Image: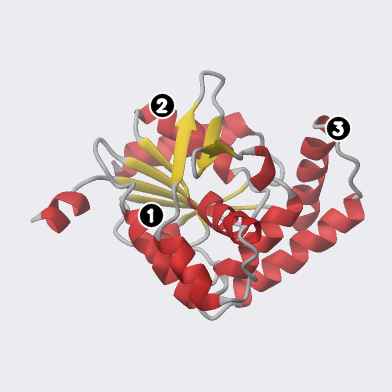
Amino acid sequence: MKGHQTESVPVVTIDGPSGTGKGTIARIVADRLGWNLLDSGALYRLLALAAQTRSIALDNVSELVKLASGLDVQFMPTKNGETEIFLDGEEVSPSIRTEEAGNNASKVAALGEVRAALVDRQHAFRVRPGLVADGRDMGTVIFPDACLKIYLTASAEERAKRRHKQLKEKGLNVNLLDLSREISERDDRDASRKVAPLKPATDAEIIDTSDIGVDEVVDRVNILLEKYT
């Protein structure tokens, strides 16, 4: 009975590579709908961070699986529209938003056993009144029965520019060419992994955000919501 009740909770998935704006769009859509939010990418970043603090190698599958099964994570929305993320009771949002954290997350996410260990944790976010989940395999693997699946895309060059701007605004000195290379390498790694590769679901609505802003993307999502929900 519990499984049927869970499946009756509506889900909107927003997938895509890094830098397409899926996190921002997911937060806005979840806020407008009054639904819960799952930043699945943060779970892998958190797992990689937790592993590092415990001196666990990022290719130590057995230890990573143990760590994933007991990961103490909380997502707390703030008044300014951001999300504070807690690991073991400590606010770690800045620590998991670095390029290093993203690359480390991509490495652990490529491990099938680790992904399997985090499936139940992600399913637990599916509670009423609904869920907006952003990530890389939300529509293809985690919530294949979602009422609306969106896949955001953008050129690697444009995504590098966006990330460069974000980091510069935070006072960080970064190289645009290095960012572009890291993003391309991560795309290749995510798309070529054997388990849950990065790709749009066959029934996903694809939106290219290369030349459009957040407001236009949200407007397109709202139109799709009226169609599918």
Residue 104 in percent (x, y) is at 67, 62
Q: Left or right? Give the position of 161 relative to 109.
A: right
Q: CA distance from mark 1 to mark 3?
A: 33 Å
Label 1 belongs to which residue?
A: 122
For residue 195, above or below residue 135: below
Label 3 belongs to which residue?
A: 171
Query: Which callout, 1 or 3, points at the residue further toward the start of the chain?
Result: 1
For residue 154, above or below residue 113: above
Proximity of marks 2 and 1: CB atoms separated by less than 8 Å: no
Q: CA distance from mark 3 to mark 2?
A: 31 Å
For residue 215, above or below residue 221: above
Dot 3: element: loop
The type of residue carrying mark 3 is Gly
Label 2 belongs to which residue?
A: 32
Proximity of marks 1 and 3: CB atoms separated by less than 8 Å: no
Q: Nearer the viewer, residue 214 or 6?
A: 6
Which image quadrant for residue 139?
bottom left
Residue 67 in percent (x, y) is at 48, 63
Q: Residue at x 33, y 60 (%)?
A: 120
Residue 49 in percent (x, y) is at 62, 54
Mark 3 Cα shell of 10 Å, populated few (<14), some (14-19), many (≥20): few
Q: Residue at x 29, y 59 (%)?
A: 145
Q: Nearer the viewer, residue 15 or 148?
A: 15
Q: Nearer the viewer, residue 114 or 187?
A: 114
Dot 1: element: helix
